[in-house]
């Protein structure tokens, strides 16, 4: 079986190591321990925001941080070892790649010297809890799947804001320069009105300028607050349903070349064991059956069969 190159083969030792580590990492107590470490890491980040506590317990906080890093390193090494017989399958899982990057980043010299970046990466460890919380994992997958639709929504929303901002600047800039004095202020005003916050005051101010302003605000609220926002909600809900279906069905199994070779090797091993068993049965029949003729008859069915190993080679 090939796992990293054309000549590399999976040894029985690697298969045994992968089986033992897989049994360890798939145990419930292991998942609970890792989840507890993630929560402990989050609590340490919160404690470091209190300057007085940091001054008094700086040494112990640093020791706890190093212990968390060591524990996360051991965990990722065990999970890597659990895929020793098929290492490519480890890198097919996006969560494995995310965990690996987060853990290895703590050992980079540039990251360790930058306190701000290091804290952000430590905060990213909290997101690893999604691996143990199915609902959170579904939500994150839904957010990722909704990005294309969300980008389209942002483009349409930006165009709508710009058009209405320019129209507002043309009609209201002289009478209401605080909100429509420039296109930037107009965009900010309309963006806040998208949530319907302060829409009453804006309509009253507009009616003092012109009665036709009600058409401007009514059309904007209808398009921005009702149509666009509902479209965005529909995109997110659709992505959430798709993510929930993906989580329920599980990831699709992709059989790589190493998996096929491993299966063929196991089948060949089973066939060789079957051939050895047939030979032993043939020898036992010769010794236990009286008379040469009966021995030949007993051995004839076995001799007439094509060895399974040769069939496998064909």
Image (tube, helix red, strand yellow):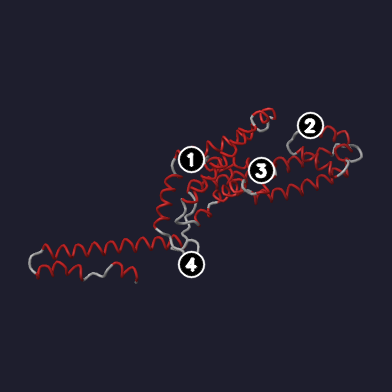
Q: Earlier in the sequence, mark 2 or mark 4?
A: 4
- In the image, residue 87 sits, relative to residue 21, either above or below, namely below
Where residue 193 appears, as percent x and y from the top left, is 77, 37
Quick check: marks 4 and 1 in contact, CB under 8 Å?
A: no
Q: Nearer the viewer, residue 161 or 283?
A: 283
Q: Earlier in the sequence, mark 2 or mark 3?
A: 3
Q: Which of the labelled discs sits on residue 181, or is there none?
A: none
Can you name the residue that lies furthest to the front here?
Answer: 59
Task: Decide if residue 238 is in sight here.
Answer: no
- In the image, residue 80 sits, relative to residue 303, either above or below, namely above
Q: Residue under circle 1?
A: 31
Q: Earlier in the sequence, mark 4 or mark 3?
A: 4
Q: Which of the labelled discs sits on residue 200, or is there none?
A: 2
Q: Residue under circle 4?
A: 6
Where residue 96 appears, as percent x and y from the top left, is 54, 49
- In the image, residue 130 sits, relative to residue 48, either above or below, namely below
Assign the N terminus to one quadrant of the image. Answer: bottom left
Q: Residue under circle 3?
A: 118
Q: Earlier in the sequence, mark 4 or mark 1?
A: 4
Q: For the residues marked 2 and 1, what is the alpha-carbon distance in whole angstroms?
A: 53 Å
Q: Earlier in the sequence, mark 2 or mark 1?
A: 1
Quick check: marks 2 and 3 in contact, CB under 8 Å?
A: no
Looking at the rendered structure, the secondary structure element under dot 1 is: helix
Where residue 11 appears, as percent x and y from the top left, is 41, 59
Task: Decide if residue 38 is in sight here.
Answer: yes
Residue 183 image-quadrant placement: top right
Looking at the rendered structure, the secondary structure element under dot 3 is: helix
Residue at 44% x, 56% y is: 85
Residue at 51% x, 53% y is: 90
Q: Nearer the viewer, residue 155 or 224?
A: 155
């Amino acid at each position: 079986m090939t796992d990293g190159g054309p000549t590399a083969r999976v040894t029985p030792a690697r298969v045994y190591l992968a089986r033992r580590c897989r049994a360890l990492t798939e145990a419930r107590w292991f998942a609970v321990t890792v989840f507890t470490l993630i929560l402990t890491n989050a609590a340490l980040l919160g404690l470091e925001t209190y300057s007085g506590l940091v001054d008094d317990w700086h040494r112990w906080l640093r020791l706890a941080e190093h212990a968390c890093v060591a524990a996360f390193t051991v965990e990722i090494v065990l999970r890597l070892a659990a895929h020793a017989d098929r290492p490519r399958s480890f890198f097919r899982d996006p969560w494995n790649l995310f965990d690996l990057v987060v853990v290895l980043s703590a050992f980079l010299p540039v990251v360790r010297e930058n306190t701000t970046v290091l804290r952000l990466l430590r905060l990213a460890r909290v997101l690893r809890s999604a691996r143990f919380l199915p609902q959170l994992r579904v939500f994150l997958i839904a957010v990722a799947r909704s990005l294309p639709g969300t980008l389209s929504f942002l483009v349409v929303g930006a165009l709508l804001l710009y058009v209405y901002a320019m129209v507002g600047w043309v009609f209201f800039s002289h009478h209401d320069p605080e909100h429509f004095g420039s296109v930037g202020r107009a965009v900010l005003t309309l963006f806040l009105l998208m949530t319907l916050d302060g829409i009453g005051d804006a309509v009253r101010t507009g009616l003092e300028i012109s009665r036709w302003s009600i058409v401007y605000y009514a059309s904007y609220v209808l398009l921005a607050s009702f149509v666009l926002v509902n479209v965005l909600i529909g995109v997110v809900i659709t992505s959430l349903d798709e993510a929930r279906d993906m989580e329920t069905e599980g990831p699709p199994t992709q059989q790589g070349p190493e998996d096929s070779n491993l299966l063929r090797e196991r089948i060949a091993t089973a066939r060789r064991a079957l051939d050895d068993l047939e030979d032993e049965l043939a020898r036992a029949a010769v010794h236990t059956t009286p008379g040469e003729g009966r021995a030949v008859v007993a051995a004839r069915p076995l001799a007439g069969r094509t060895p399974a190993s040769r069939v496998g080679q064909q």
